Amino acid sequence: MKFSFIFRFSISVIYLGIIVALSLLPARDFPSLPLFPGADKLVHTTMYFLLALTLMWAFYDRKIARWKLYGFTVAWGLIMEIMQNLMRLGRSFSLLDIVANITGAFLGILVFRYLMAKKPWLKYASN
């Protein structure tokens, strides 16, 4: 099945909107779930892993360098952390969240590259 660039890009933009909503909602709007220590870092890593994957998929057949997509993903995570601090809605700036975002973005690009190398049928889904 072939997906157009517009479709792939739209998926990335929708997912980016989800990240914005989850990042900027007041802390009181989230349920208080008893999770393991550092669970929020796993959530950050997963969110930015998926963002990198969707961006790599969206721009696979375009002439754009991977480092630009990685840079965008990392910058977006940094902007979200700064916005959390500026909005004063119970959210705070965290360097460890930024590290988790960077790690997720890096892993997303690595996994996408691996999948494209091992699964050539994915190229057809990107054309």
Image (spheres, helix red, strand yellow):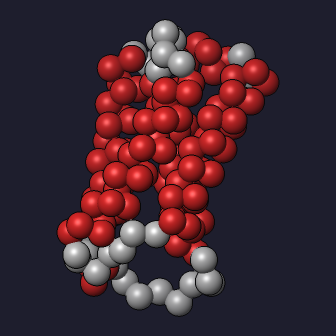
Q: Residue furthest right?
A: 118
Tell whether 23 sits left or right of 118: left
Give the quarter of the image for residue 19: bottom left
Q: Is residue 120 above or below residue 79?
A: above
Give the quarter of the image for residue 105: top right
Give the quarter of the image for residue 111: top right
Q: Residue at x 52, y 72 (%)?
A: 40
Front residue of this view, candidates 17 and 81: 81
Front residue of this view, candidates 122 and 71: 71
Q: How many marks?
A: 0
Q: Residue at x 51, y 49 (%)?
A: 48
Tell whether 58 sits left or right of 115: left
At which x and y percent is residue 5? 39, 17
Tell whether 77 sits left or right of 104: left
At which x and y percent is residue 10? 32, 31
Would residue 48 be visible to someone looking at this image? Answer: yes
Q: Residue at x 51, y 65 (%)?
A: 95
Front residue of this view, candidates 123 and 99: 99
At which x and y percent is residue 92? 36, 74
At which x and y percent is residue 61? 51, 12
Tell whether 27 sits left or right of 32: left
Q: Residue at x 57, y 59 (%)?
A: 100
Would residue 2 be visible to someone looking at this image? Answer: no
Q: Is residue 48 above or below residue 41?
A: above
Q: Is residue 54 above or below residue 50?
A: above
